Image: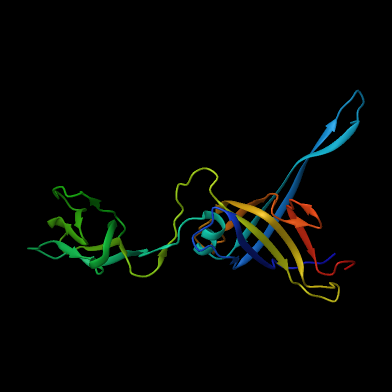
Amino acid sequence: MFIPFGPGLVYGVPVGGNRATNYTPENFIGIQEVSFNRTAKIVPLWGSNQFPDAVAVSDKQVKGKVKLARVDPDMWNNMIFGTPAPTSNAPLVYPNESHTVPVTPGPYTVSVTNKTNFSVDLGVRYANGQPFTNMQGGTLTEASQYNVSAGTYTFYSGDAGQVVLISYEDTTTTGTLTTEFNQIQGWAPIVRLIAWEYYSSTINISNNNGYIFWNVIFGGLDVPIKRDDWEYPSVEFEAFPDPSTTIGGTPNPVWSIIDGGGIGL
């Protein structure tokens, strides 16, 4: 028996399934909460009396969740996606870059600061937030219209002298892009998950305590993005038997409790 405190440490080891390229064990960083729930279906045998004649345990499941305070693409890929290695040249967003449309007689064109690696137009607004319309190469006939080509924006003459806020994306030579692809049904890494509790006190005999889930599949990934708070992504998992491992002569372990003290407290 042990008295745990805090979230401890969580490690994931890819052990099978569809593992990522250069699959690597992961130490989950920024742990906020770890929870799991073991459920079992109880099936009663009813007869003519009010209480059942017998009760048996049927289907069992162990499901859990790890809540974090980090967005860790490498961990997500090794634990959840199981896709090829991240690619280079991650997109970089430049929001609301301020420019002034040239005055008459023009030309009424503006080149963004990072024109060389320009890749995607993300829209134009006036300084007051009013949006422009991208005419997709068509004729400009009134104010609040523009065309764009390779990072050069062309505006209608009626917008001469106006301050415009241009948002766009370019491809950089740094950073990586971790991508989840549309894989065949069932595609996922199989992971061994260790939730280690190292709290030590005069009560606990050992600070080597916790839980092992021998085979898990990670499923749901929830990323709440809020106006006035940190992002706390949470990942969900379900455990199932590991046919390659034997514990005390018995095969197919699902989960184990680590009690470093062995007996008592």
Front residue (pair 243, 40): 243
Front residue (pair 142, 31): 31
User: In this rendering, does residue 126 appear at all?
Assistant: no
Is 209 displayed left or right of 190 in the figure?
right
Q: In x, y percent, where is residue 118?
A: 26, 63
Q: Residue reaching furthest bottom? A: 202
For residue 197, which quarter of the picture?
Answer: bottom right
Q: In x, y percent, where is residue 45?
A: 86, 30
Q: In x, y percent, where is residue 55?
A: 86, 36
Is 86 displayed left or right of 214 in the figure?
left
User: In this rendering, does residue 25 appear at all?
Assistant: yes
Q: In x, y percent, where is residue 111?
A: 20, 65
Is 85 above or below relative to 137?
A: below
Front residue (pair 75, 184): 184
Question: In which quadrant of the rendered image does the C terminus lie?
Answer: bottom right
Tally the marks. Answer: 0
Q: Which residue is at a point 73% across and 52% down the rendered structure image? A: 254
Is 167 displayed left or right of 246 in the figure?
left
Q: Which residue is at a point 13% across and 61% down the rendered structure image? A: 108
Question: In which quadrant of the rendered image does the N terminus lie?
Answer: bottom right
Front residue (pair 117, 151): 117
Is 143 above or below relative to 109?
A: above
Q: Which residue is at a point 44% across and 56% down the rendered structure image? A: 179
Q: Residue reaching furthest top? A: 48
